[in-house]
Amino acid sequence: MTLAARLRETLGPASVFEAAEDVIVYEYDYGLDRAMPDVVALPRSTADVQLIVREAQAAGVPIIARGAGTGISGGAVPAQGGIVVSLARMNRVLEIDADNRCAVVQPGVVNLDLSKLAEPYGLFFAPDPSSQKVSTIGGNIANNAGGPHCLSLGVTVNHILGVELVRHDGSVVRLGGKAPDGPGMDLTGVVVGSEGTLGVVTEATVRLLPLPEAVRTTLALFASVDAASAAVSDLIGRGVVPSALEMMDRLALSAIEAAFHAGYPPEAGAVLLVEVDGLLEQVENQAAIVDAVCRDAGAIEIRLAASDEERARLWAARKGAASAMGRIAPNYYLHDAVVPRTRLPTILAQVVEIGQRYDLPIANLFHAGDGNLHPMILFDVRQEGILERVMAAGREILTRCVEAGGTITGEHGVGLEKQDFMPLIFSADDLEVMARVRTAIDPSGNFNPAKVLPTPEHTRTQMRPKAAPSRIPEGMWV
Ligand SMILES: Cc1cc2nc3c(=O)[nH]c(=O)nc-3n(C[C@H](O)[C@H](O)[C@H](O)COP(=O)(O)OP(=O)(O)OC[C@H]3O[C@@H](n4cnc5c(N)ncnc54)[C@H](O)[C@@H]3O)c2cc1C
């Protein structure tokens, strides 16, 4: 009996798929790498996940956990085939414990849904990736996701108190819990950011924070990226750590405004979206400093969002920016790198130069407060040979960021996309230690193999959009 047939006996036919036209939607995670799974299973409980893991291990196939498939770096793409375990149906918030300011959730809960459910208690879940309308808590944990409001509040790892993990032999281990600062090694912290290589997260206890009393959102227009970058450094230098500090350049603004009409001025060279929150008096004081610093840095115009609606409109457009890029080109390659904040002007000038040299438009929208760049290389995949140019330009951008004292990923994960870049920032010894930690927790090596750590080319399958062989018959619609 096949793996799919065995799983169907217990999970039922509506929870296990293997036909090419069913599993093709699991070949992709918004990035460039694609590969079809052999089987897709949709568990509803931890016990279902245990069964899937045991059967998959008996069949000796790779096991790839999947949330919403927005990871971009190929983390949820089954590079070597195997079984994709979609956690989409494990999407219940099990408990909101307002007194202890935490919640217990299944991994398929969508990030924004958790904050909406916590709102009546005056609480929210702080990590807010721009994908928060769809990405899941399990995916956020596995990629240690950040977001615009993580500048002052910290990224996902700072908000996870405990996890339940299904291990390689199907056993369940619980790490951490509601009590903060448990004794022993921080194994919860090891699981966060491990990109599905250690097991399947089947439950999480997450920290909730009180909603701020007041929020002020400022949109500051600048003639150039340099002037906006100077304002970023001055602000932090003045001791103001905004809850969010986002920058968008002219090309990004033109697409965002055309798509959303949210009030972003396409004629500006760059804009900063700066948000401060907290107690009312403190917020008024900080908003005044934001205003003064932006003026000193040469802002052409400064607008304070006049209402909650205007604020929501500005954020909806910023968080929807990636889809707006379709106004410029049918495809984009979204990079994710970090540099020390003071190096932003230099790096952004280099990104522009790289774009010109490779004849590729590059839009920039990013978490400026963290120095977390998101250059979006815009292209049309139907153009012969263009992917080689796109990849070469991306490689140069990452190399320049590392040379500037930065790193190769801020929040999207390493996945398939960036494993070859790991030696740029880690020594062979560092990588060896990481491999040993991985093997200690998953001795089978079947959880998300050929990901994160550099893997010899011949042992992985990297497929690019045009080159990907399809199991779908020619001419068939899916
Ligand atoms: C338009 C857009 C904007 C984005 N903005 C941001 C941003 O601001 N900040 C940010 O950090 N990221 C951002 N991302 C990237 C992405 O949304 C995040 O990394 C997110 O956390 C991925 O969640 P997911 O549910 O889609 O995970 P998936 O893509 O499904 O999976 C990601 C990784 O997690 C593993 N995984 C998933 N669930 C589990 C589980 N239960 N147990 C173990 N491993 C698991 C997978 O194997 C894979 O390695 C953005 C992506 C897009 C497309």
Image: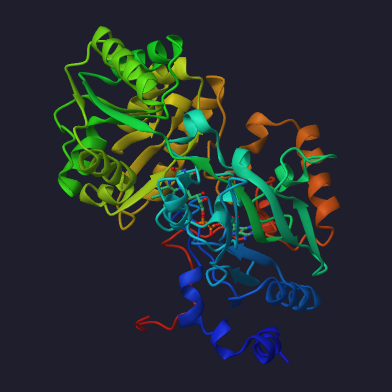
Residue nearest the observer in this picture, 157 or 459: 157
**In the rendered view, does 194 fall on the left or right side of 34?**
right
Identity of the residue drawn at 50% across and 24% down? 339
Placement of the C terminus among the 4 image quadrants:
bottom left
**In the rendered view, does 437 fall on the left or right side of 10?**
right
Residue nearest the observer in this picture, 373 or 315: 315
Placement of the N terminus among the 4 image quadrants:
bottom right
Identity of the residue drawn at 65% across and 30% down? 425
Residue 37 in view, yes or no: yes
Q: Position of residue 140 (x, y in %)?
A: 55, 50
Q: Position of residue 102 (x, y in %)?
A: 60, 49
Residue nearest the observer in this picture, 435 or 467: 435
Toward the front, the furthest residue is 99
Identity of the residue drawn at 22% across and 43% down? 309
Residue 17 in view, yes or no: no
Count of numbered labels shown in the rendering: 0
Q: Position of residue 196 (x, y in %)?
A: 66, 56
- 15 shown above or below 72: below
**In the rendered view, does 130 fall on the left or right side of 411?**
left
- 280 shown above or below 137: above
Task: Tell me which colouring the rendered structure shows.
Answer: rainbow
Q: Quadrant of residue 144?
A: top right
- 416 shown above or below 189: below
Residue nearest the observer in this picture, 283 or 242: 283
- 222 shown above or below 95: above
Identity of the residue drawn at 45% across and 38% down? 394
